[in-house]
Amino acid sequence: MSTDALPGTAGQDAGLESDRALLGRTSTAERLADILRTRIIEGYFPPGTRLSEEAIGTALKVSRNTLRETFRLLTHERLLVHELNRGVFVRVLTAEDVADLYRLRKIVECAIVRGVTGPPGDALRPVEAAVEEGRDAAKRQAWRELGTANIHFHQALMTLGGSTRVDELMRGVLAELRLVFHVMVDPQPFHEPYLDRNAQILNALRTGDGKTAERLLAGYLDDAERQLLEAYRSKAL
């Protein structure tokens, strides 16, 4: 695989300069990891992209040591891979990774919504905001953004559990999920139908009906896993 043909290497500095302020006065590997993880979730770095130390370091004004520590953190999270004498790349996931991610999602996400036994009130605002974000993206036919909004919806669902550990776990899981979405050649028919299903889950949660929300979410995750695995099989043919 030639690095010249890899997507995203050119222009990485231009896209990241706006994130420089997020690092604050003291640039740390953890803050930088948050920025790059968010960029992966947003689809800015597709699978197989070689990350340029020079371009990212220049854009964010961080040292090579800080950047390399960040790469190690994100490699530990299974978002990046280091290839000897070639550099650091955004990971390309396999069908086995997809099945494992959805196994975890079904355990964690379904448990969180099942635990809702009364109207959550203001706690639902992030979920509502994510649904509106998705509707706006669909109106603009911004299908990659709709995929990002869908990820934000699931991140917001996890906040209902009131656990920072769950939130941290699922940030990494959902970042990996974005890498899976790239297997869908046409994102519209994949992402668009789930917008209405997100709204159905939201409506169930508004009334405190966690059991219905769990049933809807379980079917939703089963269908998404099946579609993605079919896409992987088609790609392998």
Image (cartoon, grey):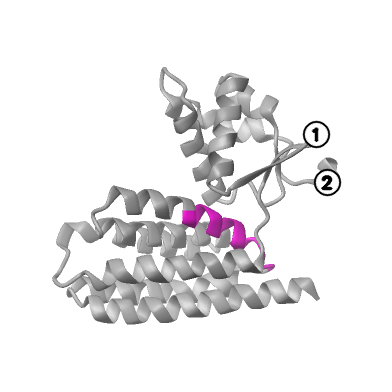
Q: Are marks 1 and 2 in contact (CB under 8 Å)?
A: no
Q: Is residue 181 magenta?
A: yes
Is residue 176 or residue 119 the one in the foreground? Answer: 176
Vertical comparison of 6 with 233: above or below: above
Mark 1 Cα shell of 10 Å, populated few (<14), some (14-19), many (≥20)? few
Report the amino acid beneath label 1: Asn
Q: Is residue 115 left or right of residue 198?
A: left
Q: Is residue 71 left or right of residue 108?
A: right
Magenta extent: 173-185
Look at discs 1 and 2 and give the one toward the viewer. Answer: 1
Q: Is residue 91 magenta?
A: no
Q: Is residue 204 left or right of residue 59?
A: left
Tell me, for residue 5, which label it has, or none.
2
Report the amino acid beneath label 2: Ala
Mark 2 Cα shell of 10 Å, populated few (<14), some (14-19), many (≥20)? few
Q: Tell me which secondary structure the magenta stretch mostly adopts.
A: helix
Give how far across and how far down residue 187 sits, in percent.
61, 67
Give how far across and how far down residue 1 sits, in percent.
84, 49
Report helix, strand or loop for mark 1: loop
- Which residue corresponds to the image point at 43% horizontal and 62% vertical from the top-left? 134
Q: Quadrant of the C terminus?
A: bottom right
Give how far across and how far down residue 124 sits, in percent.
24, 61
Q: Quadrant of residue 85?
A: top right
Report helix, strand or loop for mark 2: helix
Vertical comparison of 23 with 111: above or below: above
According to the picture, the residue beneath numbered tag 1 turns out to be 85
